[in-house]
Amino acid sequence: MTAPSRSAPAETPAVRCRSLGVSFGTVQALREVSLDLAPGRIHALVGQNGAGKTTLAKVLGGLQAPQTGDVYIDGRRIPPGDVRAAQIAGLAMVHQHFSLPPSFTVAEALELTAARKGGRSFFRRSELHRQWQNEVAELGGPTMLSTRIRDLPVETRQSLEIVRALAGDARILLLDEPTALLTPAAIDQLFERLLRLRDEGVTILIVLHKLREVAAVAETVSVLRDGELVLGPREMAEVSEGLLSDAIVGPAFGTDRTISMAPAVKPTQETLLELVGLSSRESAFELGLDEINLRVESGEIVGIAGVEGNGQRSLVSVIAGLAPVAEGTMRLGGVDATRTGPAGRRQRGLRLVPFDRNTEGISRSAPLWLNQSALRLVGRHRWRLPLISLRQYKRQAAEDMDTWRVRYDTVAQPAESLSGGNVQRLILSRELSPGLEVLVAAQPTRGLDFSATDFVRRSLRELRDGGAGVLLISSDLDELFELSDRLLVMYGGRIVARFDAPYDRRAVGDAMTGAQR
Amino acid sequence: MEQILATTLRSAAPLVLVATAGVFAFRAGIFHLGLEGLMITGAFTTVAVGDATGSVELGILAAVGVNLALSALYWWVIGPLGANVIIAGLGLTSIGLGGTAFALGAIFDTRGSIFTDVVLPRPVRGITSGAGVIISDLSILVWITPLIVLAAWVVLRRSRFGLRLAAVGEYPFSARSAGVNPSIVRLQALLISGSLCALGGAELSVGALRNFTENMTNGRGFIAFVAVIFGAWHPIGAALAGLFFGFADAIGIQSQINITERVPREFVLMIPFVLTIFAVWLGGLWRRRSLEAEAGYAELREPD
C-alpha cells in the first residue's frame, strides 16, 4: 500500500493542496483551491472548459508553478513547479496531449521519460530492449519496442503513456482528460486498468468531461468552476447527476435566444452534396481517401464518426476544394464540382466550419470585421466596380456578430483576442450566411463549454429543419448520436459502416476500431 | 590524381567537424546559422593565441574558450531574451567575420592575413604505395575527426543525454514532462557545438594552412549547415555529406591546377557549389525522411 497510515486516526492524504492560486495575465485560472485526496481511491475532477482543471493538474504535477499555495504529497511539501521533485515523491502524470516524441522508438521514449534512478548514461540498444520488455509485454510484446511512436494507434499511445507514468514506481497517477481521443471500447479498457491499479494501492486523480464516465469509474468527485473548487471531494454515492451538473454550470446560466436562420428553403428532397468513388492522395499529415461514396440531402444531418486520423481531415479538405481529388466525382447541388476551386464551391452554397478554428477558421491577427466579412469578398457584386465600402462592411459585420451574440469590444480588435466559444460563434456568423445549401462542420463543439456547445448544436438542428444539408464530422459519439439522421463510420480513409438511428454504441465503436463483425 | 585523396580529407575535415557541431544544435531544435562565425573565431583565436604563446595546444584551448563564451551569449539571446534564432545566428556570423577582421588590425596591425609558425602536429609524414604518394602531410585533427564523429554518434544515439537532446528539439513538452529543463539542454548542445566549431576553425588555420586570412572560412560554415540537412540531422550522415563536399572542393582545387589554361578559372571555382546544389536536389529526391523531419518541426509548438 502507498500510504501506510502513519498517524492512526487521520489518514494522511495522498495529495493535499492548500489555497493554490494561478493567474495568467488578468485571467485567474485557479483561485484558493484546497483539496485533499485520500490514498488508494479513484478521484474524478470535472468542470467546464476553462474551469482550471488542466491548470490544477499541471500544478500538482509540477509543470506549472502556482503564485500562491502549496502542494503536499504523502504529507511532504513539494517545491513548486518542479516536475522532478513530484516524480520522486511518487506522482506521475498522463497528459491530455501525448507527451512522447513521435520520432522516438518505444524503447527510447520509455527510457527518456521514465524517472528511474541510477540508470546508466550510455546504453546499448539490446540492453534497452531487455530492460523494457516486461513493461510492454501486454501491449504487444518486445517487437513493438523498436516501433516509432508516430506509427502507433491512438489507444496504444495512450496505454504507453500510462506504462511510462508507472515505470518509475508511481503511487499517484494523474490523468488529464485521457478519454478524449478514445473509442468506447478503449475507454472501457482504460477504466478496467485504472480499477486494477486502484486495487494495487495506486491513488488516481482523473480529469473527465462527461458525467457518464465519472459515474463509471470514480469513487469521489470534485468540481471546478471558474478556477474555484465549488464541490469538494464528495463520495459518488452522495451526489446526484443533477447536483453535479448544477455545480459545473453554475447558478446564472445565461440562455441564448434562438437564431432563426433563413436558408434556401427546399420543399422537395434534393441531393445537395454527393461524393462518388472519391479518392485522394495521402499527405504528410493525414491518410488519403479511399473510394468514398456519400450523399447529403436537404433537411438532414449526416454524421461521420471515427477515431481521429482516419481520413476525416482529408475528407474536409477535399470537399472544401483545398486538396486535389485523385479519382472520382464530387457534385454540389447535382452539378459536377470536382474541378471547381474553393471560391466556386462557396458560391454554390458550400459552407465550412473547419477542424481547427484558430488556424483554419480565422485569420488570427486580422480584425474581427474582416474575418466576419471574408465570404462577402468572394465573387459577389460582379456588376459593380471591385470596390468595397469599409463602413458598410464593418456595419454589416457588427450586425451579424450581434445576431450571433459574439462578445467583443470593437470590430477592429484582432480575432485572436476572442475566447474559443466566441471564435466559433464568429465562424458560424460568417458561414451560416444567406446562400447556404450545405454545411460541412468538423468538430464544431470541440473545446466549447456547455452553453456554447448547446448553442452550436441547436444552430445545426435549425439549419437542418430549414432545409439545408449538414455533414457533421465529430469524434464525440454522444454528439453524433444526438444530432445525426444517419451515421457513417470512417476507418483507414474509407467508409466502413453505415448506421441509422437508433444507434448501437457498441456496434459503432467496433466499426471505429476497424473490427470486423 | 593521387593528391585527390589527401586534398579531399584536408578539405573535408573542417566541414565534417562543423557539420557535427551543427548536428548537435539541430537536434536540440536550434537552426544554428552562427556556425560560420564560430568557425572563423576558432581559426583566428588559435592563430592569435598560438602565435603569442608559441603553443598550438594553448591556441586551441583559447579558441574553445572563446567559442564557449560566444555560444553562451547566443543561447542567452535566443533563450532567456527570446530573440529570433535565425537572425541571432546570422548576427553571430557577422560578429565572427567582422570581429576577427577588426582584431587582425587591432592586434597585428595588418590587413588581409597573418602567417604563423605554430602548426598542428602531423603524425604521419606520408603513406606511399607503388603508384606514389597517397596521403601526405595531414594534421592530427584530420586523423581524429572520424573518432569525434563516432563519439558524437554514441552521445546522440546511445546515451540518455542524447535522448533528452532529441526530445527537446522535436517536442519540448515531452522533455518538460519528463522533468528535463529544455533551456539547459539547449545550452549544453550549443556549448558542444561551439567547441566543435573551434576545432573546425583551428584545422583550417593551423592544420591545412599556416595562416589566418580575413574571411578565410569563405562560406564553409554554411556548407556545413547544408551538410547537416543533407545528412538528415544524423551525425554519420552529416559527416558523409561533409566528406562529399570536401571531395567536391578537392576536385575544384585539383582541376584548377591542371586545367586552368583551357577552362576559365571562374568555371572551375564554381564546381564545388554546383555539386552542392546538385547533391541537395538529389538528397531531396532520395529521402522523404527530411520531409518528415520538417513536419516534426511543426510540433515544436508547445501544447498548452
Image: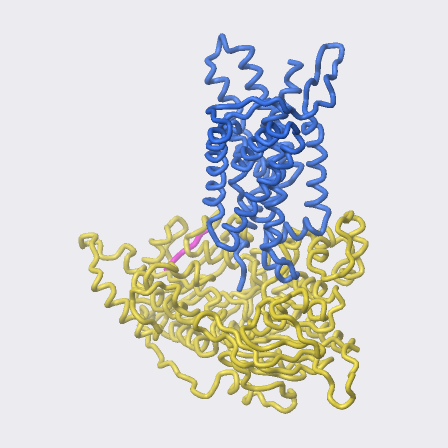
Chain colours: A yellow, B blue
Q: Which residues are magenta?
A: A329-333
Instruction: Check the picture and name the quadrant holding the N terminus of chain A.
Output: bottom right
Residue at the top extreme of this rendering: B261
Q: Viewed as shown, does residue A196 lie left or right of B259?
A: right
Query: Which one is in front, B300 or A285?
Result: B300
From the viewer's perspective, is residue A110 above or below residue B237?
A: below
Image quadrant assignment for residue A499: bottom right
Indicate the position of residue A28 as horizontal and vertical percent values: 47, 75
Quick check: is A330 in the magenta stretch?
Answer: yes
Rendered residue at 53%/33% (across/down): B281
Instruction: Check the picture and name the quadrant holding the C terminus of chain A.
Output: bottom right
Q: Is residue A507 visible?
A: no
Rendered residue at 29%/70% (across/down): A400
Quick check: is A55 in the magenta stretch?
Answer: no
Image quadrant assignment for residue A412: bottom left
Indicate the position of residue A327 as horizontal and vertical percent values: 49, 48
Magenta segment's dominant SS is strand
Query: Which one is in front, A427 or A113?
Result: A113
Query: Which one is in front, B101 or A120?
Result: B101
Rendered residue at 66%/64% (across/down): A158
Indicate the position of residue A391 as horizontal and vertical percent values: 21, 63
Q: Viewed as shown, does residue B184 lie left or right of A389?
A: right
From the viewer's perspective, is residue B171 above or below residue A298?
A: above
Indicate the position of residue B189 as horizontal and vertical percent values: 62, 47
Q: Viewed as shown, does residue B27 lie left or right of A293?
A: right
Q: How many marks?
A: 0
Query: Which one is in front, A287 or A416?
Result: A416
Q: Is residue B108 visible?
A: yes
From the viewer's perspective, is residue A28 above or below residue B223?
A: below
Rendered residue at 38%/72% (across/down): A463
